[in-house]
Image (cartoon, rainbow, N blue to C red):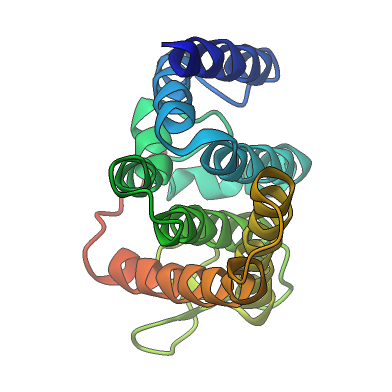
Amino acid sequence: MKELIIGLIFSGIIALAAFKKRSLSLSGVVASVLLGTLMYYFGGIVASGMMVAFFVSSSILSHIFKGNKTALEKVNEKGSRRDCFQVFANGGMGLVFAALFYYFNNPLFLVGCAAAFGEANADTWASEIGVLSRKKPISIITRRTIETGVSGGVSSLGTLASFLGAAFIGFSFSCIYFLTYGYNIIIIFSPFIITLLGFIGAIIDSFLGATLQAQYYCE
């Protein structure tokens, strides 16, 4: 019960602050509080830290480069304010790994949790920073030039940002894990695994975006 209360207070403070900064919609606040509470209950400070590292870094980038995405909103319904669907899409898999850690007490599931957030962070960083590229992206499927903001588009800048986004979560995991549990062999290899899985996951996400995701244009 104590973990649930701590998680509720912790996630509630962050969610309300994000709502005031217009990083979350009202439904996003509710989803974030629920997700954050369960994340802390199952995975403790390490899993919660991964969620916070992803959300804070991606929200900062969303606000910094918000002016660069005005025209892109015609082909991309996502805005800088995350709703409940986006919250669970980004954190749902991390919660699954946190729950597995709770029931099996295997730290490798915490690595899986971090890798899930690494993928979400890699995808977000690629989207937020990739729009700054002076060259138009190319389709990950056809390798032909496409319009900026269309799903499945990749660029050199966006790809680098994707790798750095995954690496940021990997580095954050090692720091938080060390402060929580002390030195462990996991600290040595986990950043590389998290970075690799997060980066590969973001590439797969781009592939799915180009092949399965519906795209609309609204005047």
Residue at 54 percent across and 50 percent down: it is: 72
The structure residue drawn at horizontal position 58% and vertical position 43%, both measured from the top left corner, is: 46
In the rendered structure, the answer to whether residue 152 lies left or right of residue 70 reads left
Vertically, is 176 above or below 26? below
| Residue 178 in the image, given as x and y percentages of width and height | 71, 54
Q: Is residue 146 above or below residue 184?
A: below
Q: Residue furthest right?
A: 64
Q: Is residue 165 left or right of residue 29?
A: right
Identify which residue, 180 or 19, lies in the foreground: 180
**Front-most of 40 and 129?**
40
* Location of residue 161 (image quadrant): bottom right
Residue 45 to residue 1: above or below: below
- Numbered label tally: 0
Q: Residue furthest bottom?
A: 143
* Percent position of residue 128, x then y: 64, 54
Tell me which residue sits at (64%, 55%) in the image: 173
Where is residue 14? Give x, y as percent. 64, 20
Name the one closer to the observer, 128 or 40: 40
Viewport quadrant of the N terminus: top left
Q: Quadrant of residue 129?
A: bottom right
Q: Quadrant of the C terminus?
A: top left
Task: Tell me where residue 170 appears, x and y as whole percent.
Answer: 63, 63
Residue sitting at x 64%, y 13%: 13
